[in-house]
Image (cartoon, helix red, strand yellow):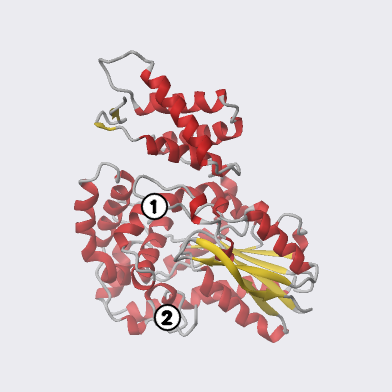
Amino acid sequence: MIEWIVKRDGRVVPFDREKITFAILQAAIAVGGRDRVKAERVTDDVIRMLEERNRRDSYPTVEEVQDLVEKALIERGHARTAKAYIVYRYEHSLKRAGKKSLTYSAENIPYEKLWEALSWAVDHDCVTLAELSESVRGGGFPELIRASEEFYNQELEKAAGLLKERLDATRMIIVAGPSSSGKTTTTIKVEERLEPEGFSFIPINLDNFFLDLDQHPRDSRGDYDFETPQALDIPLISETFQGLLAGQRVSLPFYNFKTGRREGSSGELELRERDILLIDSLHGLFPEVTQGIPDESKFRLYIETLSQIKDESGQFVRWADIRLLRRSVRDMQFRNYSPEQTIRHWHFVRRSELRYIVPRLREADAIVNSFLAYELPIMRHRLGELFPGFLRAFESDPESADALDRARRIHQLFREIPVWTDEAAVPKDSLLREFIGGSRYSY
């Protein structure tokens, strides 16, 4: 029996076969499979090969186990799963070496939007966290709130203007972007700008298309990965969309999050002549979700927190860290999910973003920058005191290296800025209200 394994940093930790099975299942799901029995068989093959090593004087290493996983997948004929596993493994090696993911390229970087954001930051003395701090201490923070909201509304006007030019041909609007970028509020505000044109958005909740929970793999903590497009019943989604756009009346499924199963129907839906089907989803731009629907019928809107603010070391604050803070506050307030749990789960979120969401940015018809320059001092007020405890928890847990890196970075960010406690200064229709609460919109 294999009882111990050597990590890349040299630590010897208990061997856990479930981690092998989980990794195999994740690779299988990426290419459309989800057969746990097959994953268990591959795991058995790996363990058998490990036991045949006849090296009782040393423990297997993580790299050795991963090599055997590749070998076992290929020998059993799972070539597509093996390819996905190899790519995932290589991307992690790039990350450990401090190199960019394979999914990033010059085409994925919205330079024009970044220039607009940087130009605005220069004009409003908000290029660095030090300047942001001065606006809090010097009494200029309410004006920064007003100016930030005005900038965001200008972003909305540009996007709505582009959509209006294509209204006659558009049957579906897809609002996509990574987690907590502000898709829901942005969607509502764009719709408000289209009401005078006589068109209505008809939303469809893709959460009801989740596969039953027993078809999702869990990690060693029992955490499910709902962040990939393969967590959804994509064939059923595609069939539903095509039926709606063909003028049919369709029945929509209902997903019961308490039982983790689809149960019955959430109602029926039919599109009228001036209705536009609204898809507000992380994975709205994933090709298989809208396959068979002509591109000219779709308007693709992408939302991201395109911050251009630097810390004291001269590094730009990461967009993903801003969104992690938003999601931590929202999960704590509305989803009974602690910030510590959110940070531990974030590696699922980020992996899916880099693989399935970020590469699709170049396909967007319009991009909205949802970063609000004033939100960080408010986030520090909400979360700042919790981070020392997170650091202690993650430092004592060898499996929380990713969470520890993020927590350290955000803790340092919070040390560079003061808190802002007067949330009454945030407008009731602000996108930030989607996360901190008190919005005039119903979500």
**10 Å crowding of disc 2: few (<14), some (14-19), many (20+):** some
| On screen, residue 230 above or below 237 | above
Work out whether residue 368 can be spotted.
yes
SS at mark 1? loop
Q: Circle 1 is placed at which residue position?
A: 223
Q: Residue at x 31, y 32 (%)?
A: 15
Q: What percent of the width, then of the height, locates residue 160?
A: 64, 74
Q: Earlier in the sequence, mark 1 or mark 2?
A: 2
* Image quadrant assignment for residue 8: top left
Q: Residue at x 29, y 55 (%)?
A: 312
Q: Residue at x 43, y 84 (%)?
A: 428
- Side of 23 relative to 423 (left or right): right
Q: What residue type is disc 1 on?
A: Asp
Q: What percent of the width, then of the height, locates residue 259?
A: 46, 63
Q: What percent of the width, then of the height, locates residue 345?
A: 38, 53
Q: Circle 2 is placed at which residue position?
A: 146
Q: What residue type is disc 2 on?
A: Arg
Q: Find the distance from the CA under tag 1 to the CA under tag 2.
A: 40 Å
- Of tags 1 and 2, which is closer to the observer? 1
* Image quadrant assignment for residue 176: bottom right
